[in-house]
Amino acid sequence: MIAYFILVHRYPNQFKRLFKAIYDPTNHYLIHVDKRSGSELAIEVREFLVDYPNVSILESKKMLWGGYSLVDAELRGIKHLLKMGLEWDFFINLSGQDFPLKTQSYIKHFLSKNIGSDFLKIADQNKIRPDTLHRIEDYVTEHENEITTSTPVQKRPFLSGVTPYIGNQWMILSRSFCEFLTNSQEVDRFREFYRNTLIADEGFFQTVIMNTSYLPTIINDDKRAIDWIPMGTIKLRPRDFVSEDAVDLLSSKDLFARKFDESIDGNILTTLEEYLLQKPDAAIGRKLVANTI
């Protein structure tokens, strides 16, 4: 079983298309609707999900881009899924603007060959992304509507004996690592430190897994097709895929892609939906999996 955790903050119709594309009665789905998005979105999502028995909705809290609230949502989601007592093997997080590139049959078969592995992008922050070190050196505080940096800027040393790592927010985590994140006191100091860092969701999980006993389980691949493009002071942002990307996406070895905006191009989602509905048989799925690992 796969435990999906989906973060939704806008575009309810697009979320519905995503959900239908990844739905399988043997999986479980946990949904978080950003409280900043208002009650109308939350009501529409809840009403849509009422007919699906294997779905839960996590208590909504406000999330702020760049803030620790994103990490907190992930950790709350993992804890909630573990407390449910379900026998799932992998945790997969998605946003409402993601979309699968493979069928659930394919994804489940692929993951069954990789039980105990953790899929996430990882890079040594000191060596590969020194331009981002201010994220962990500056002392920042997340408020309800903004993130502030101490003035004058208060630099602080990193955790003793720990190497900082960086990557993407999106990941596929083993149940074992999820249990470690939830139950181990070893994780406490990471949580406390990253609570006052910038864009913690792109470093917290990478730093924890690379500095603990879970290092051997890592596969440095988040199984996402993402086209990063420059955007002002943020440095990079994911480009919205359009119909012209269909050939590349359909031939990709990734399991999911991000991101999509149906107000810009909804036809690309239709193309992917039609492809997934073909439901390749198990033999084809096994062959595809063999070529993906």
Image: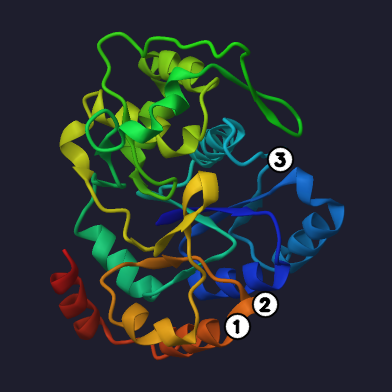
Q: Residue sitting at 58 percent across and 59 percent down?
A: 54
180 or 271, which lies in front? 271
> Is 40 above or below relative to 144?
below
> Is 268 above or below relative to 183?
below
Label 2: element kind: helix
Q: Are marks 1 and 3 in contact (CB under 8 Å)?
A: no
How far is disc 1 from disc 3 in space, using C-alphas?
30 Å
84 or 115, which lies in front? 115
Residue 53: percent from the left, percent from the top? 63, 61
Asked if residue 218 lies left or right of residue 241, the reply is left
Q: Residue sitting at 44 percent across and 45 percent down?
A: 169
Residue 206: percent from the left, percent from the top? 33, 35
Q: Are marks 2 and 1 in contact (CB under 8 Å)?
A: yes
Q: Residues within 10 Å of mark 3 (few under 14, many from 20)?
A: few
How far is disc 2 from disc 1 in space, using C-alphas?
6 Å
Could you say which disc has been placed on residue 266 in the image?
Answer: 1
Quarter assignment of residue 50: bottom right
Q: Residues within 10 Å of mark 2 (few under 14, many from 20)?
A: few
Name which residue type carries label 2: Ser
Residue labelled with disc 3: 59
Residue 224: percent from the left, percent from the top? 36, 61
Name which residue type carries label 3: Glu
How far is disc 3 from disc 2 in space, using C-alphas?
28 Å
Marks 3, 2: nearer the viewer: 2
Residue labelled with disc 2: 263
Asked if residue 225 lies left or right of residue 127, the reply is right
